[in-house]
Structures are given as structure tokens and as C-alpha cells.
Amino acid sequence: MLIQNVLIGPDVKKLEKTIDANFLSDSIFVGRASGRSMEDVGIFDGDVLIIDRAKIVKNYDVIVACLNGQFVCKIADLKNNLLLSASSDHSPVKLTKFDQYNIEGVVTQSIRMHRVNLKLG
């Protein structure tokens, strides 16, 4: 069972005001990681993700996708049509013709939040 592990929306949008403008452009947006499935690639619960829509996805890139209405951060296995977690505790997700799937962008950076602002969700 796949669980949404990226938060996107108005509360997270406020994060853009706290991030240096050098990180942002028209093709870049931010999300917040949720859960532990990507810890083995250094993405932890609560981290801010810098996501670039302009990057061309390459095999094994860390991406944010919308899968069946849920935003997920996964590793793209393009050759096998799989979404992989960085943790062996989570099974790969095989994409089928029945899935509604859209890659939102490539995660180019993550920022560890040591002092979380509760107003930012």
C-alpha cells in the first residue's frame, strides 16, 4: 500500500518566503517530506524538498510524482516502470495502465529542518 509522503499546498507554499531566492525559479517549487521511506537517500520526515519541473528525469532520480491522487517522493526506475523507496521496508510500486500518474519534478535538493515552524505545517 502506497502512502502519500510529500505535502504540497498552501501551507507549504509559505516556505518559499523563507528560502533564499537563489534556490527558486519559475520551474521550481517546494514540498515537505513525510514519513521514513526515503531516509536511506538522506531525505527525512519534515525535510523541505526543492523540486524542479524543468529537469529531465533520468533513471534512478529522486522524484516527486502524483500517483492516483497522492503526492509521493520516490526513486524512478524508468527501465522497469517502478517507483522505489529508499528503504527495504517498503515494496516497489509497479506502475500499470490503470494508474493515474504524473511526474511533478526531480528533487534537486533537500533541506533538513532542525527547528520547525509549526505555522508552516
Image: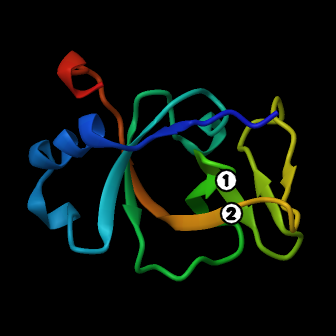
| Picture layout, residue 6 above or below residue 109 | above
Mark linked to residue 67: 1
Indicate the amino acid at tag 2: Tyr
Res. 15 mark: none
Task: Write the residue at 82% across / 29% down.
Answer: 89
Give coordinates of residue 104: x percent, y percent.
50, 64
Residue type at the position of mark 1: Leu
Q: Which residue is at the front of the view, 86 or 92?
A: 92
Q: Check the image and report above or below for 101 versus 58.
A: above
CA separation, marks 1 and 2? Answer: 5 Å
Where does the image place residue 113, in percent across and percent down from the top left? Answer: 30, 29
Q: Quadrant of the N terminus?
A: top right
Residue in view at x 26 percent, y 34 percent: 11
Marked residue nearer the N-terminal end (1 or 2): 1
Q: Position of residue 34 (x, y in %)?
A: 51, 30
SS state under label 2: strand
Q: Residues within 10 Å of mark 1 (few under 14, many from 20)?
A: some
Who is closer to the viewer here, 10 or 74? 10
Q: Give the quadrant of the C terminus.
A: top left
The residue carrying mark 2 is 101
Of helix, strand and loop, which one carries label 1? strand
Q: Are marks 1 and 2 in contact (CB under 8 Å)?
A: yes
- Local crowd size for mark 2, using a 10 Å CA cut-off: few (<14), some (14–19), many (≥20): some
